[in-house]
Image: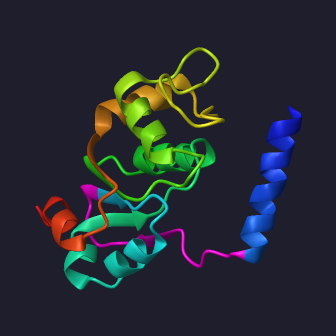
């Protein structure tokens, strides 16, 4: 493990202790659509309080990292074969570019070392096996609304 990686891991643990994020995800009553609010926790909370949206989405969650978070999304999609679309919205987490990495994964896949091809973040390396990544890429379509936090603009993709 590089010194930079050790430092970043330690900094992440300090941030988690100092700025705890209450919710990572909220389960909905739908089956085919998921929403990922990236680093926009306030947007995630607004979505979770909307009965109309939560009746239609399977899950609403955040994505803060370009590695563990994306592995978790792949695992969720794998366990939910009815899921067909992920709406990516909200603001990116500075430095990690998790949304960009998720879109690069969808478009390009991973290389032989598990690195997301075309990802700009510092550690876009997944632990998910290639077969699971490819199944994820075939199963879902991703709607890119990165940067958009206006719920009125996002809602049509969630309740369609």
* Count of numbered marks: 0
Residue 75: image location, x then y, percent: 51, 46
Q: Main secondary structure of the magenta part?
A: loop
Q: Is residue 113 above or below residue 79?
A: above
Asked if residue 157 lies in the magenta stretch, the reply is no
Q: Whole-percent x and y of residue 81? A: 33, 46
**Magenta range:** 19-33
Q: Please say whether residue 129 is visible from this viewpoint.
A: yes
Residue 1: tell me if it is visible.
no
The residue sitting at 29% across, 72% down in the picture is 29
Residue at horizontal 51%, vertical 44%?
97
Q: Quadrant of the C terminus?
A: bottom left
Answer left or right for 146 relative to 84. Answer: right
Residue lying farthest to the top in this orientation: 112
Which residue is at the front of the view, 78 or 21? Answer: 21
Residue 135 on image: x %, y % = 39, 31
Residue at image point 57% right, 28% down: 129
Q: Quadrant of residue 19?
A: bottom right
Which residue is at 86% across, 32% downward? 2
125 sits to left or right of 104:
right
Q: Is residue 86 above or below residue 138?
A: below
**Vertical placement of 148 versus 129: above or below?**
below
Horizontal and vertical percent position of residue 55: 23, 76
The N terminus, quarter of image = top right
Query: Quarter-wise, where is residue 37 in the image?
Result: bottom left
* In the displayed structure image, the side of residue 71 where residue 105 appears, left or right: left
Q: Is residue 22 inside the magenta stretch?
A: yes
Chosen colour scheme: rainbow
Q: Find residue 60 and report its image quarter.
A: bottom left
């Amino acid at each position: 493990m590089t010194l930079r990686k050790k430092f970043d891991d330690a900094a992440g643990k300090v941030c988690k202790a100092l700025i705890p994020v209450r919710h990572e995800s909220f389960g909905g009553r739908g089956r085919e659509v998921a929403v990922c609010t990236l680093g926009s926790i306030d947007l995630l909370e607004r979505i979770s309080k909307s009965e109309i949206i939560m009746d239609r989405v399977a899950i609403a969650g955040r994505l803060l990292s370009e590695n563990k978070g994306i592995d978790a999304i792949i695992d969720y999609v794998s366990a939910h074969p009815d899921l067909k679309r992920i709406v990516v919205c909200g603001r990116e987490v500075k430095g990690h570019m998790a949304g960009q990495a998720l879109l690069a994964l969808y478009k390009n896949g991973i290389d032989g070392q598990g690195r997301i091809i075309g990802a700009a973040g510092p550690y876009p390396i997944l632990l998910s096996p290639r077969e699971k990544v490819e199944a994820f890429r075939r199963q879902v379509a991703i709607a890119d609304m990165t940067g958009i936090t206006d719920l009125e603009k996002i809602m049509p993709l969630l309740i369609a």
